[in-house]
Amino acid sequence: MVKIALPLLAVILFVGCKGSVVKTRAEAQKNRKLLLSLNIGMTEDEVLATMGKPKKTKAYLLDDRTIEFWFYLTEGYMIDDGRFRDSDYTPLAFEGRKLIGWGRSFYDRTLKYEHKIETK
């Protein structure tokens, strides 16, 4: 009985941990599905209602425009030291509180001309 209980307890603790692969994989999968509900022109409030709170945000000054990016976890695997890579997140871009695009390619193209002004 003890031989079964110890491994079972270890699995329960592993699955229940906040940063566990199981939980982060589920969060990433949920976020990937929710991305399909987004539309260009949605307000920040509409995106919050759809996606929930982002994991992190960054704002950039491009000429006279401010572009804010919200980052959502969309890959559920951590690197060895327990941190996620930038590529594990999908960025959503806002200008004037409206969604103007999303995805890593959109982010990379936008950053060619960036002047970072704020990180939250």
Image (cartoon, rainbow, N blue to C red):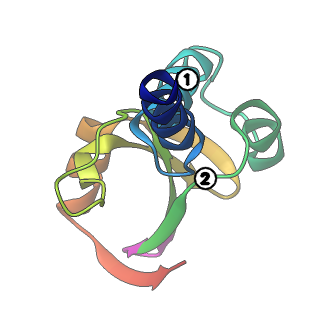
Q: Which mark is residue 54?
A: 2
**Of 118 and 33, the residue lying toward us:** 33
Query: Looking at the picture, how far across and down is residue 41, in whole percent?
Result: 67, 33
Residue 101 percent coordinates (x, y): 47, 36
How far, Cα to Cα, is label 1 from label 2?
A: 12 Å
85 within the magenta span: no
Q: Quadrant of residue 77?
A: top left
Callout 2: helix, strand or loop? loop
Q: Is residue 63 magenta?
A: yes
Report if residue 67 is visible in the image.
Answer: no
| Mark 2 Cα-neighbour bin, 10 Å: few <14, some 14–19, many ≥20 | some
- Name the foreground residue: 111 vs 22: 22
Residue range (magenta): 61-65
Which residue: 23% across, 37% down?
105
Q: Residue 49: x percent and y percent? A: 83, 36
- Asked if disc 1 and disc 2 are in contact, CB closer than 8 Å, the reply is no
Label 1 crowd bin: few (<14), some (14–19), many (20+), radius 10 Å: some
Q: Which residue is mark 1?
A: 35
- Picture coordinates of residue 19, whole percent (x, y): 48, 51
Q: Which quadrant of the view contains residue 12?
A: top right
From this viewpoint, which residue is outermost toward the front?
Answer: 1
Instruction: Identify which amino acid the numbered label 1 is placed on.
Output: Leu
Q: Identify which residue is drawn at 30% across, 54% down.
A: 84
Q: Quadrant of the C terminus?
A: bottom right
Which SS class for mark 1? Answer: helix
Principal SS element in the magenta part?
strand
Residue at horizontal 56 percent and vertical 15 percent from the top? 33
Comparing 21 with 70, the one in front is 21
Q: Is residue 91 above or below residue 31?
A: below
Q: Residue furthest bottom?
A: 117
- Location of residue 64 with respect to 34 vertically, above or below: below
